[in-house]
Image (cartoon, helix red, strand yellow):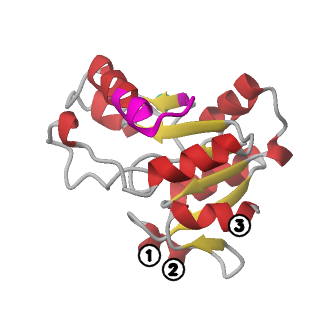
């Protein structure tokens, strides 16, 4: 299975927190890539930190509506796993902790060895490592900054669109 981060990986990075969620946009290549992976039999999940909920910027309902809209646009079945908490809550689910990834694996009924996490941030890399899941860094979003913080062995993709060649 493939577990994706959302912001900076499948959708454009938020410019700031105080924006209208109805304006969140998918990268143009995200939908076609997800559709091809689904056709190849991959289970697909998204694991996303959404502390804007805990910060009071958005409601859980607004985020759920956004995710429904994205899933409809992408046209694939996706399992969504999100941390709604404020960083100060020290919750057990915020990436780089592994709980969201573990939840995605459990729902798919797959071991960590059969999953790949794709993301743009150190928290994504950390969550993957903590869950025992292979990690691929995309250079969209915060990816270029993140690259300098990770070791030389990290698997790097320009965008998620390059994932298909990687998995082939
Ligand atoms: Zn949380």
- Along the viewing direction, whichever of 14 and 132 lies nearer the viewer: 14
Residue indicated by mark 1: 144
Q: Which mark is residue 124?
A: none
The image shows residue 68 at horizontal and vertical percentages of 39, 25
Task: Tell me which residue sits at (63%, 38%) in the image.
Answer: 44
Question: In the image, is 92 to the left or to the right of 139?
Answer: right
- As measured in the structure, the alpha-carbon distance from the residue carrying label 2 to the one carrying label 1 is 7 Å
Task: Indicate whether 138 appears above or below 19.
Answer: below
Question: Which secondary structure lies at badge 3?
Answer: helix
Quadrant occupied by the C terminus: bottom right
Question: In the image, is 16 to the left or to the right of 118?
Answer: left
Residue indicated by mark 3: 166
| CB-based contact (under 8 Å), mark 2 and mark 1 | yes
The image shows residue 75 at horizontal and vertical percentages of 48, 34
- As measured in the structure, the alpha-carbon distance from the residue carrying label 3 to the one carrying label 1 is 19 Å
Q: Nearer the viewer, mark 3 or mark 1?
A: 3
- Magenta span of residues: 69-80
Q: Could you tell me how many numbered marks the image carries? A: 3
- Along the viewing direction, whichever of 52 and 138 lies nearer the viewer: 138
Q: Nearer the viewer, mark 2 or mark 3?
A: 3
Residue indicated by mark 2: 148
Task: Tell me which residue sits at (21%, 44%) in the image.
Answer: 17
- As measured in the structure, the alpha-carbon distance from the residue carrying label 2 to the one carrying label 3 is 22 Å
The disc, 3 or 1, on the residue closer to the chain's N-terminal end is 1
């Amino acid at each position: 299975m493939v577990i994706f981060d959302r912001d900076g990986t499948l959708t454009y990075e938020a410019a700031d927190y105080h924006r209208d969620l109805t304006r969140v946009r998918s990268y143009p290549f995200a939908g076609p890539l997800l559709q091809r992976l689904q056709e190849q039999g991959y289970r697909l999940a998204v694991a996303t930190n959404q502390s804007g909920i805990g910060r009071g910027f958005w409601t859980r309902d607004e985020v759920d509506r956004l995710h429904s809209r994205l899933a409809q646009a992408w046209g694939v079945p996706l399992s969504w796993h999100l941390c709604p908490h404020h960083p100060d809550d020290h919750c057990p689910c915020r990436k780089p902790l592994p709980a969201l990834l573990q939840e995605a694996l459990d729902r798919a009924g797959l071991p960590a060895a059969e999953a790949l996490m794709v993301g743009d941030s150190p928290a994504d890399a950390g969550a993957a490592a903590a869950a025992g899941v292979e990690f691929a860094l995309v250079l969209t979003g915060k990816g270029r900054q993140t690259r300098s913080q990770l070791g030389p062995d990290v698997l790097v993709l320009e965008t998620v669109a390059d994932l298909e060649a990687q998995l082939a």
